């Protein structure tokens, strides 16, 4: 498939925004493979990636009027895919463990009961803290520190600049550190970026 020029893409977006089906179909078919690969990167599961891609197409058709043209259409589209995947994950409330994420499947010794209680409390406190961050920061933290994506990858997916991402991570990390110290959680917040 021939790459669309920025002018062609802008024209298709304008036509799709006013309801022209052919323009919407061309936009989606042109970007579909990229959407799927991004969904696969986020979900790490081909079936879920297909579902997320389909849901994302529906979201694009419903919300094309919200595209303001401040960034490339592909950046906006990537954000739709990532948000759709994250919302789907939240609905499902489960992670799929993979060897890539967890490494060896050898059983580790069971932690002491008091360690489990302490760890659960720290997770609860951290989860509560993350839920209080401004909208989108929790997802950014998840993408960076749970999914292990690079800042560059997150920047490309979300359309946020690297300096903006670094600033958001830094401010949130400082707030987390203050919350840990204020609440005497008994953990040290590592520097990350």
Image (spheres, helix red, strand yellow):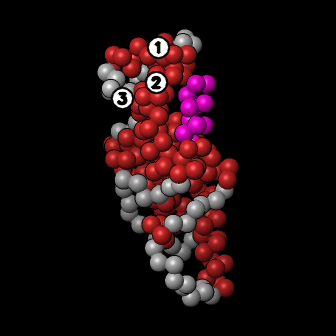
> Pointer 2: what residue?
27
Percent of width and height locating residue 86: 57, 47
Residue 164 shows up from this direction: no
The disc, 2 or 3, on the residue closer to the chain's N-terminal end is: 3
Percent of width and height locating residue 34: 42, 38
The circle drawn on residue 14 is 1
Quick check: 116 left or right of 162?
A: right
The segment highlighted magenta reads 52-62
The circle drawn on residue 1 is 3
Question: What is the quadrant of the C terminus in the image?
Answer: bottom left
Q: Residue at x 33, y 43 (%)?
A: 163
How far apart are labels 2 and 3 at the CA level?
12 Å
The crowd level at tag 2 (other Cα within 10 Å; few <14, some 14-19, many 20+) is many
Q: Secondary structure at mark 1?
A: helix
Above or below, 71 relative to 52: above
The disc, 1 or 3, on the residue closer to the chain's N-terminal end is: 3
Q: Residue at x 65, y 84 (%)?
A: 114
How far apart are labels 1 and 2 at the CA level?
11 Å
Q: Main secondary structure of the magenta part?
A: helix
Above or below, 53 relative to 186: above
Instruction: Judge by depth and name the residue closer to the eye, 57 or 144.
Output: 57
Residue 20 shows up from this direction: yes
The crowd level at tag 3 (other Cα within 10 Å; few <14, some 14-19, many 20+) is few
Q: Secondary structure at mark 2?
A: helix
Instruction: Judge by depth and name the residue closer to the eye, 76 or 173.
Output: 76
Above or below, 136 relative to 74: below
Examine the image and state in which quarter residue 173 appears: bottom left
Q: Secondary structure at mark 3?
A: loop
């Amino acid at each position: 498939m021939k790459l669309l020029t920025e002018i062609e893409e802008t024209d298709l977006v304008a036509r799709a925004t006013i309801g022209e089906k052919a323009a919407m179909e061309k936009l989606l078919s042109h970007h579909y493979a990229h959407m799927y690969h991004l969904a696969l990167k986020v979900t790490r599961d081909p079936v879920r990636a297909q579902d997320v891609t389909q849901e994302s197409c529906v979201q694009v058709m419903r919300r094309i009027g919200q595209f303001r043209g401040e960034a490339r259409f592909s950046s906006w589209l990537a954000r739709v895919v990532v948000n759709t995947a994250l919302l789907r994950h939240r609905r499902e409330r489960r992670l799929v463990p993979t060897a890539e994420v967890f490494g060896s499947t050898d059983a580790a010794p069971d932690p002491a009961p008091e360690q489990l209680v302490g760890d659960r409390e720290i997770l609860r406190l951290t989860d509560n803290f993350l839920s209080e961050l401004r909208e989108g920061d929790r997802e950014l933290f998840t993408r960076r520190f749970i999914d292990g994506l690079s800042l560059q990858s997150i920047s490309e997916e979300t359309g946020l600049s690297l300096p903006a991402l670094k600033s958001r991570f830094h401010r949130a990390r400082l707030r987390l550190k203050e919350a840990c110290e204020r609440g005497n959680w008994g953990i040290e917040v590592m520097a990350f970026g």
